[in-house]
Image (cartoon, rainbow, N blue to C red):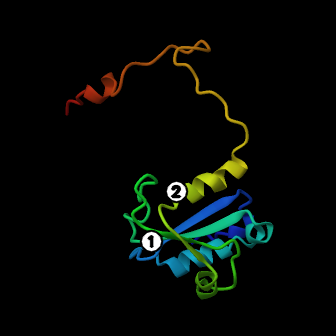
Amino acid sequence: GTPIDLQQIDTPSYCLATMNDHIVLWPAAYQSARGMSNLVDSKRVRFVLAGAGHVAGVINHAATGKYPHWVNTTLPENHEQWFAGAEKMQGSWWNDWYQWLLTYAGDRIPARNPGSNGFPAGEDAPGRYVKKRLEA
């Protein structure tokens, strides 16, 4: 019962849908991306359609790229117009996401060194807490 105003989102957004998704049909996902009209107008929202279904389309590994994806730099009024103007790209959408992300990523910083900055290093995974048994 709480309304959501997608126009209040001001974070660059990469919107992914999969062609044969049985949970979120891609035309509906497309309309969600279009709902962020403030981002659409500023070109800070990107909609990409991956091949395959709900799981396979998302986890389509960048190295193997079994399924294609479609990209379109514009977000016309409806999904049919978007698809008509989209370019089919071979391979995984992950590479497209990575390139898109680089435009917003900023400078790279080195990872923290465990045990530095006054914080003690933890322990090797999985850690003692995983092996603790809770007695009923």
Left-right relation of 42 to 113: right
Q: Quadrant of residue 132?
A: top left
Tell me whether circle 2 and circle 1 mark residues in contact (CB < 8 Å): no
Frontmost residue, 105 versus 11: 105
Quadrant where the C terminus is found in the figure = top left
Q: Residues within 10 Å of mark 1 (few under 14, many from 20)?
A: many
Frontmost residue, 76 versus 124: 76
Amino acid identity at mark 1: Gly
Frontmost residue, 9 versus 4: 9
List x then y, in percent, for residue 47. 61, 69
**Residue depicted at x 59% and y 83%:** 79
Q: Quadrant of residue 15?
A: bottom right
**Residue depicted at x 43% and y 52%:** 63
Left-right relation of 96 to 68: right
Quadrant where the N terminus is found in the figure = bottom right
Location of mark 1 (residue): 51
**Residue depicted at x 71% and y 75%:** 74
Location of mark 2 (residue): 94
Q: Which element type, helix, strand or loop, lies under badge 2? A: helix
Q: Quadrant of residue 34?
A: bottom right
